[in-house]
Amino acid sequence: MRPIYILIIVITAISGLTQCKKDKNTDCIDNTQRNELLQSLQKYSFDSVQFSGNERRFLNEIRAIANDIDALSDNVDTTISLENTYDQILSNFLAHIALVEQKANAFYNGSPAKIILTKNAFVLMSYDALQRKYPEFMWTQLGIFAANEVRNGLVMALMLRQTLMKNNINIPFNGSDVSSVLLATSDVLIQGQLDVLSDIGCLGILNKKIGAGNIKNEAWLTNEGREAFRLQELAEQQLAIGNCSQYMDLQTQAAIQFGAHEQIYILQPMWDQPLMAQFALLNQVVTQLTQHQLVFFGDIFVGTNKSSEFNKGYTIKTPANVSNLANASQRVDVAINGFNTINSIRKSKAGSYWIDYSQIKIGYFYDVYNAPWIE
């Protein structure tokens, strides 16, 4: 609880300021390691350390939806234009998301905070499922850890909101109340997460079903998207001949371009909203006042939970030039640094094992960021 009250003090100070102002490719993709880890972690799907038995069963239902990847494209007509094929897969993604929201609304009796956290759980579980099914498409390998950082920020924000409400603390912030801003911001952030999941999921499925070489010149794609598929094709050519180092490096460059596409075209409209501009300011000032000890978003922890794994995981720090998350080019810098760093980590056996272990653990939703008392 103590960090929450520290945050209250910090935000109160900020408020005052703001009021004033066996193919060869198996050599490169270690499916054996992934499968062994998957088997060893299956027990966690029944774990109830953080969740009641009923809630764990509910979360397993959400996980089943997230892992139903084949259903997203099984009945898609691939004889039509690729843009229309994308739209069909997207429609199926949106149907899955709607089902998750419906189930969360019923299970948590309409609690907006719990629904937000359930949607994030679906995002994390989906990235795990996509990465295990399509490991040649690297974006999700970092994406799951970035999305997990968002979960950390959401839990912190919703914990703070709950504390403020329980103690009848009202702190004005840019013409509104902090608790209201925290909930509204969390809602906008989770929608942004779902938008990215749906888009990158569609692109990853198209890559597998159609092939990067058949997608790279599509006019409906962004420039970054076309460049990403061009690099993805080169990466998979290196994968086919077992050139692992070149494969990983080209795969990373492709993921960076996909990351730029997501930040500029999918997420920027979210950050352009006045509410998110406020939140970017809040994140910036909290980070500065606490000397980076408290950060809602920016750093990426490669692991499951930075609190319980502080001496085990890898923290990818926000680049020094990044101070405003509302700026697309600065978020692209975060992505570039993130993909290059995780590429270096995964090239060692220990790093590769840790990434796979953490990813699957998150996918099973064991030891994740959580606060049971959030209502």
Image: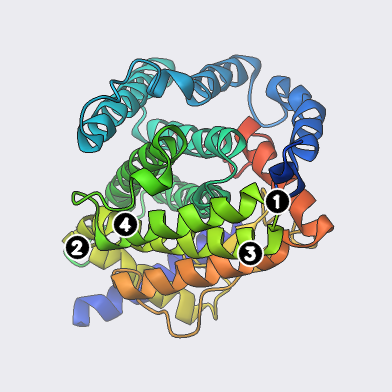
Q: Residue furthest bottom?
A: 321
Q: Position of residue 240 (x, y in %)?
A: 63, 47
* Pointer 3 local density, CA inside 10 Å: few below 14, some 14–19, many at least 20: some
Is label 4 in contact with label 3 (beta carbons under 8 Å)?
Answer: no
- Mark 2 against mark 3, which lies toward the viewer? 3
The residue wearing badge 4 is: 226
The residue wearing badge 3 is: 246
The residue positioned 32% from the left and 68% from the top of the image is 280
Which mark is first along the chain, 2 or 4?
Answer: 4
Q: Is residue 115 left or right of residue 248?
A: left
Q: Amino acid at mark 2?
A: Asp
Q: Amino acid at mark 1?
A: Ile
In the image, residue 225 sits, relative to residue 74, either above or below, namely below
Q: Amino acid at mark 3?
A: Gln
User: Residues under labels 1 and 4: Cα distance?
Assistant: 28 Å
Is label 4 in contact with label 2 (beta carbons under 8 Å)?
Answer: no
Is label 3 in contact with label 1 (beta carbons under 8 Å)?
Answer: no
Which numbered disc covers residue 272?
A: 2
Which mark is first along the chain, 3 or 2?
Answer: 3
Which mark is first along the chain, 4 or 1?
Answer: 4
Kindly state the secondary structure of the residue where label 1 is placed: helix
The residue wearing badge 1 is: 355
The residue positioned 33% from the left and 74% from the top of the image is 329
Is label 1 in contact with label 4 (beta carbons under 8 Å)?
Answer: no
- Mark 4 against mark 2, which lies toward the viewer? 4
Q: Is residue 321 left or right of residue 244?
A: left
Which mark is first along the chain, 2 or 1?
Answer: 2
